[in-house]
Image: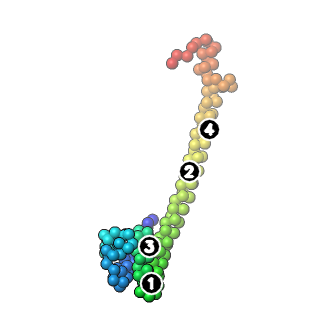
């Protein structure tokens, strides 16, 4: 199962982040200070050397969105963030479908083991009953009692 976001979409988003940041006259350092995302993480994201967390993405885009509003801009940044979140949501939904399939498989496996365990317990019980006879005592214990022999351990 692919646990990652489509790489081509991620690269497109990373390039867009850099373009928006530069258009608002922000350096990586200033975006870092305002968003709380380290400058090295921002540099790695923009260069495609690093994946990005959803939390960091939201923090960076919120800062950029505030800049856009302060300059009287439209909703380009919000649209970009929504696009990124849709990409992430799709990836998460695919992963949940995969996990659900694994859970169903594990449930079937559990049920099989429960059946096998019940079979083993039944066999154990049958063997114990056969060994104890009707008295509820083991054959060895009944023999010792008849002969008056103490058990030596």
In the depicted structure, whether residue 122 falls above or below residue 42: above
**Residue at position x 49%, y 72% in the image:** 89
- Quadrant where the N terminus is found in the figure: bottom left
At 58% from the left and 50% from the top, the residue drawn is 111
Label located before the other in sequence (3 or 4): 3
Between marks 2 and 1, how big is the CA–CA gap?
Answer: 55 Å
Q: Residue at x 68, y 25 (%)?
A: 134
Dot 2 or dot 3: first in sequence order is: 3
Q: How many marks?
A: 4
> Where does label 2 land, which residue?
110
Residue at the location (53% across, 66% down)? 97
Q: What is the CA distance from the residue labelled 2 to the residue labelled 4?
A: 18 Å
From the viewer's side, name the closer residue of 144 and 50.
50
Q: Nearer the viewer, residue 14 or 33?
A: 33
Which badge, 4 or 1, comes first in the chain's sequence?
Answer: 1
Q: CA distance from mark 1 to mark 3?
A: 16 Å
Q: Which mark is residue 69?
A: 1
Residue 40 appears in the picture as rendered = yes
Q: Quadrant of residue 24?
A: bottom left
Cα gap from disc 2 to disc 3, whole angstroms: 40 Å
Q: Position of residue 42 (x, y in %)?
A: 34, 72
Q: Which residue is mark 3?
A: 58
Q: How much space separates mark 3 and mark 4, taking CA atoms?
A: 58 Å
Q: Nearer the viewer, mark 2 or mark 3?
A: 3
Q: Nearer the viewer, mark 2 or mark 1?
A: 1
């Amino acid at each position: 199962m692919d646990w990652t976001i489509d790489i081509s979409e991620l690269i497109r988003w990373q390039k867009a982040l850099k373009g928006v940041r530069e258009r608002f006259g922000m350096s990586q350092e200033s975006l870092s200070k305002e968003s709380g995302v380290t400058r090295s993480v921002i540099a790695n994201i923009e260069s495609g050397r690093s994946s990005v967390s959803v939390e960091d993405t939201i923090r960076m885009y919120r800062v950029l969105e505030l800049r856009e509003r302060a300059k009287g801009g439209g909703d380009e940044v919000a649209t970009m963030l929504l696009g990124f979140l849709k990409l992430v949501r799709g990836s998460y939904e695919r992963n949940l479908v995969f996990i659900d399939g694994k859970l169903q498989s594990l449930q079937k496996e559990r049920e099989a083991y429960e059946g096998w365990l019940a079979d083993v317990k039944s066999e154990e019980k049958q063997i114990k009953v056969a060994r104890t006879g009707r008295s509820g005592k083991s054959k060895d214990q009944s023999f010792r009692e008849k002969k008056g022999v103490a058990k030596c351990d």
